[in-house]
Each structure stands twice: as C-alpha cells, then as structure tokens.
Amino acid sequence: MPIFILTDDNIDAAKAALRVALPAIRSAHLTEAIAAGLGFQTHAALRAALASDTGKPPAVADAASSMFTKRLAELGYDGVPTHSFEVATTEKVLGDTPYTFFKQGDRVANDRHFHACQARNRPMVMVKMARQYAKLEWDCITIDSDCDDHVSSSASNGLVRVMFALFQEHAKGAPGKPLFYGKAFTGTVSKLLPDTARQLAEEYFKLLYLPLRDLPAPRRRAA
C-alpha cells in the first residue's frame, strides 16, 4: 500500500491523472473516491485535515485502491479497475513522494532528490536499481540539525533496532543475501528485490519522517 504525501499538489496531480484514465466518472465523484482511497470519509474531511496541518510538514496517508473503487461502486460505478488509482499515487504521477527510484549511478537523480529533501527538511530515502537487485539508501543529512535528535541522539538506538527488525521481516529467505548496514541517521540495505526495497523505503520513511511533524519549524526555515 503506497504512502501518499498529503499536499494540494499531489492531490491535484492524482486527480488529473485519474480524469484521463477514467473519463466517464464525474469530477465530483472522482474527488470523493480519491478522499476515500486516502482514508477519509469525505472530500470535506480531507480538506479539513489539510487545513488543520497548516504550518506543519504534510501528513501522509496509505493509498488504498480497494477503498477508491469501493467508493466509486457506492456512487454507481461498478467494475472500475484498481490499476488506475495505483498508478495515480506513485512517483510516475506525483511530484512529492516519500522516496525516489532510479538506476544505480544516476548522479543527476541523486542530486535532484538531495536538494528536494533538503528544501523540505526531510530524510533522503532512495531505491537504486542495479541489473537484478536494488539498493535502499537513507540519509538524514537533509534534516535540519534542530530537528534530528530522533536519528542522531541516543534515542536513535531504538529506532535502528526497529529498522533492522523490519529488514529481517521483509528480507527473510530472500535471494541475493540482502545486507543491512548503518544507523538511523544513514545506512543502506543492499541486494534487495525491487518490490522489497520499495516496501522498506516506505516504512523507513515513516519512521524517519513522522517525528518531524511534532516539532516546531527549524530556526533557519521558520521564515
């Protein structure tokens, strides 16, 4: 279930893609179905949640295609495939995603993601694809030092244990013998299957990012 960063731009981009993919669905009904797919009872509830988060880093939601199609069925659209919503909530469509995915050695993509994460005061999470396996990397150098206690202080010891436990859960019995190396602040998991790397990237992003929502804005970014 992909993570969706709740911003106006992401919601608008997802709706634009879905209007192209599902032209028979009325705009208002599509809006309600998107809200359902993001875990909200109504579009009004989604808008209220966005408004209440003003001044904070954006919230995240688990994008559930089953809830999207269920709401459409309630509105009279039976048999809508889940694929359209799944595509509309990925990096193929959205400009703001929890991690980026690119080929190993692509310095342009790496640098672009670094600057985007630094500007947004977020952990830098990447999945780098080689010929057969993927490498997951994370680095919290892009988080302002005013906000990084959860990944740089003694509290990070518990966090990295959670990260390692998730690695063991997802990579158990996997081919390639995946290897976890690092700490909460920065690290890598190598020789992962691509789908496993994506799953871990999303779970690690939540662990590294969500604590930032409870903190005041860093001094250098407060303006």
Image (spheres, rainbow, N blue to C red):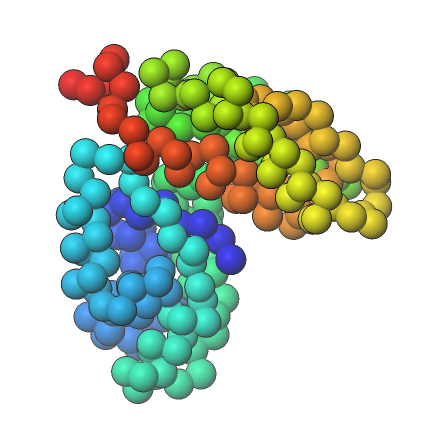
Q: 30 left or right of 150?
A: left
Which residue does the image show at 43% across and 20% down from the upper left? 149
For the residue pair 159 and 105, the one nearer the viewer reads as 159
Looking at the rendering, which quadrant does residue 183 occupy? top right
Pick the residue in front: 194 or 203: 203
Residue 142, percent across and down? 43, 20
Percent from the top left, x then y, of residue 1? 51, 57
Q: Residue at x 34, y 16 (%)?
A: 146
Residue 31 to residue 223: above or below? below
Left or right of 154 in this view: 216 = left
**Quadrant the C terminus occupies:** top left
115 in relation to 170, above or below = above
Asked whether residue 63 is in view, the answer is yes
Asked where in the image residue 101 lies, by quadrant, the reply is top right
Which residue occupies 71% across, 25% down? 181
- Place of residue 40 in the rendered image (x, y in percent of width and height, measured from the top left): 29, 64
User: Does residue 131 appear anywhere in the picture?
Assistant: no
Q: Nearer the viewer, residue 43 or 145?
A: 145
Percent position (x, y) of residue 132?
77, 41
Nearest the viewer among 80 and 21 is 80
Number of marks = 0
- The residue shown at (77%, 32%) is 179
Direction from residue 220 to residue 70 in the image, left or right? right
